[in-house]
């Protein structure tokens, strides 16, 4: 299983989403973070099983929340570059790639 590295921008995405959901209903932000952790665990175990949205870039969707985890599979690791709302930021992850 490859090591998963979560970039600072993806952590910032999560912090913002967590704060918003917590403001809506206490505990909901924690549920979002649990869903994210579950998605990252699945990505680590089966990195190539999720949809390729661009060359070398894949997307895993959270089950209960409208968020995508955008990641890149590298030789020895997986880089999570974004955790974005599915409808608002569909292409924002492109700005985070070093291509």
Image (tube, helix red, strand yellow):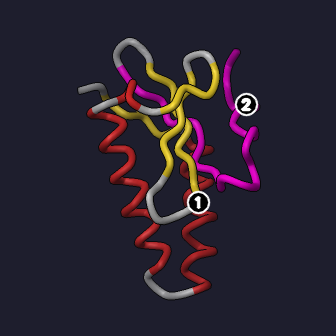
Tell me what residue is drawn at x 58 percent, y 60 percent: 66
Quarter-wise, where is residue 21 in the image? bottom right
Residue 9's place in the image compared with 56, above or below, is below
Q: Is residue 85 magenta?
A: yes
Q: Nearer the viewer, mark 1 or mark 2?
A: 1
Which quarter of the figure is the C terminus placed in?
Answer: top right
Pointer 1 residue: 66
Residue 50 in the image, given as x and y percentages of width and height: 44, 33
Residue 81 bears which disc, if any?
Answer: none
- Element under label 2? helix
Tell me what residue is drawn at x 40 percent, y 60 percent: 35
Q: 88 or 33, which lies in front?
A: 88
Residue 84 in the image, given as x and y percentages of width and height: 63, 51
Q: Residues within 10 Å of mark 1 (few under 14, many from 20)?
A: few
Tell me what residue is drawn at x 75 percent, y 38 percent: 91
Residue 82's place in the image compared with 47, above or below, is below
Tell me what residue is drawn at x 36 percent, y 37 percent: 43
Q: Please report whichever mark, 1 or 2, sits nearer to the chain's N-terminal start.
A: 1
Pointer 2 residue: 94
- Element under label 1? loop
Q: Is residue 34 magenta?
A: no
Q: Which residues are magenta?
A: 77-99
Q: Residue at the top extreme?
A: 75
> Real-space Cα distance between discs 1 and 2?
19 Å
């Amino acid at each position: 299983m490859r090591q998963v590295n979560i970039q600072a921008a993806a952590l910032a995405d999560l912090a913002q989403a967590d704060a918003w959901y917590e403001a809506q209903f206490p505990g909901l932000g924690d549920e979002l973070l649990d869903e994210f952790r579950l998605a990252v665990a699945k990505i680590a175990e089966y990195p190539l099983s999720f949809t390729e949205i661009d060359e070398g870039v894949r997307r895993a969707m959270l089950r209960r929340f409208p968020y995508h985890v955008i990641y890149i599979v590298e030789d020895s690791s997986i880089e999570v570059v974004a955790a974005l709302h599915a409808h608002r930021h569909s292409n924002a992850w492109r700005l985070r790639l070093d291509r």
